[in-house]
Image (tube, helix red, strand yellow):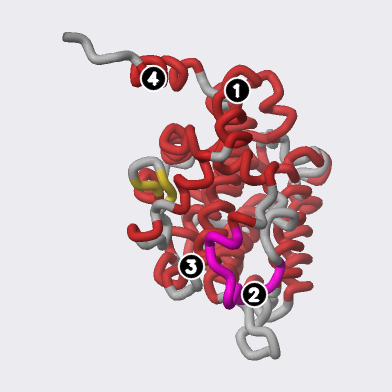
Amino acid sequence: MPIVGEAEVALLAADRVQAVRNSTAGRLRLAAEFYPATVGRCGRYDRAELSFLRWEIARGVLNGPSGQRPGSPWWRAVNERLLRDKVEASLLHNGTPGGPSSRSVELWGEFITGPSAAAWYRAHNASVVAGYLEHEPLAEAELLAERFMMNVALMRVLYTHALAARPRLALGTFAPLGRFLGNPRHGMVGLFLDLRHAFPEGYPLTAITVESLIATEGRLPRALDYGIIAPRLAELYEFAATSLEQPRIAELINDGAPCYAWPPAHRSVWLEASTRLLTRLTANATRTRSSRRRARRAAMPPRD
């Protein structure tokens, strides 16, 4: 029997994803069947991923390109990267000869052999970030409101990884709650990864401005995005770059603000919402010790 190389395993995975590209039900099935075939004994690691996938399906962003409501080329491409990586890792785990074609596939293999919340986030986020980086030209073709949602989704999934792996970074004083809140098997993670209560479900977001998205986001999601995540964004992306072994993540923020497929002229939208009272109170309550020290130093009058 000939040895199947890395390229051949990757092609097998790509063929399986290609078969469901224009079927949202098929994408959901392919995403879900990975878990019982690999780590089914270890509980609900699929919970957060499948919840987000159902939100994508409800929005219509994963619809095929030729239907009455065509989907988003960007959301489809990023989802396909995640699916291919998982399918390839599953094939390797279940005996297909060969080796992983990318570091993200390798991380899924590490998750399979040693399941944990932190290992799941490393694998999942490595695939998602790879999709973001690979398909930035597609993102730049989307409406600005859509690109705002892309950045929020990335911020949140990187943040939930920190909850599970670096709770002190994620929650400061409330670090003991981090691993519980960030566990992808628990319903509480939906507070961070469920975007249904923060943004509209339609696609495309025609006639919707970024400012109107922020205005309708709600107090709790706004406090999360601008009060908890935004003040530690530089540290958070630095952590993600190191953990996922992808230094280009550092390119996705600029001077403390997200900048994935984002025009510099609109940077202010990331800063204005942080001035609201609830947002400022939330930010202060969850500061890390290092950020508190920096804030105190910044407030001190200059020495003569």
Tell me where residue 206 sits by quadrant.
bottom right
Whichever of labels 1 and 2 marks the residue nearer the N terminus, that label is 2
Q: Are marks 2 and 3 in contact (CB under 8 Å)?
A: no
Under mark 2, the amino acid is Tyr
Mark 2 — residue? 203
Q: Is residue 10 left or right of residue 59?
A: left
Residue 294's label in the rendered image is 4
Q: Residue at x 56, y 26 (%)?
A: 166
Give above or below for 283 relative to 262. Answer: above
Secondary structure predominantly adopted by residues drawn in magenta? loop
Can residue 108 be seen here? The reply is yes
Q: CA distance from mark 4 to mark 1?
A: 15 Å
- The alpha-carbon separation of the residues under discs 1 and 2 comes to 36 Å
Q: Considering the numbered disc 3 on the image, is that residue within a helix, a strand or a loop?
A: helix
Q: Would residue 249 appear left or right of 204 to someone viewing this image?
A: left
In the picture of the structure, the residue carrying the numbered disc 3 is: 144
Q: CA distance from mark 2 to mark 3?
A: 13 Å
The answer to which of marks 3 and 4 sits earlier in the sequence is 3
Say which residue appears at 62% left-offset and 39% top-offset.
223
Point out the tag, 4 or 1, that comes first from the N-terminus: 1
Q: Identify residue type, mark 4.
A: Arg
Q: Decide: few, some or many residues near mark 3? Use Cα within 10 Å; few <14, some 14-19, many ≥20.
A: many
- In 3D space, how far apart are the residues under numbered discs 3 and 4 (Cα atoms)? 33 Å
The magenta stretch is: 201-213
Could you tell me if the residues under marks 1 and 2 are in contact, i.e. CB atoms within 8 Å?
Answer: no
Q: 10 Å neighbourhood of mark 2: few (<14), some, or many (≥20)?
A: some
- Residue 285's label in the rendered image is 1
| Pair 1/2: label in front | 1
| Rendered residue at 73%/78% (across/down) | 23
Say which amino acid is labelled 1: Ala
164 vs 258, nearest the viewer = 258
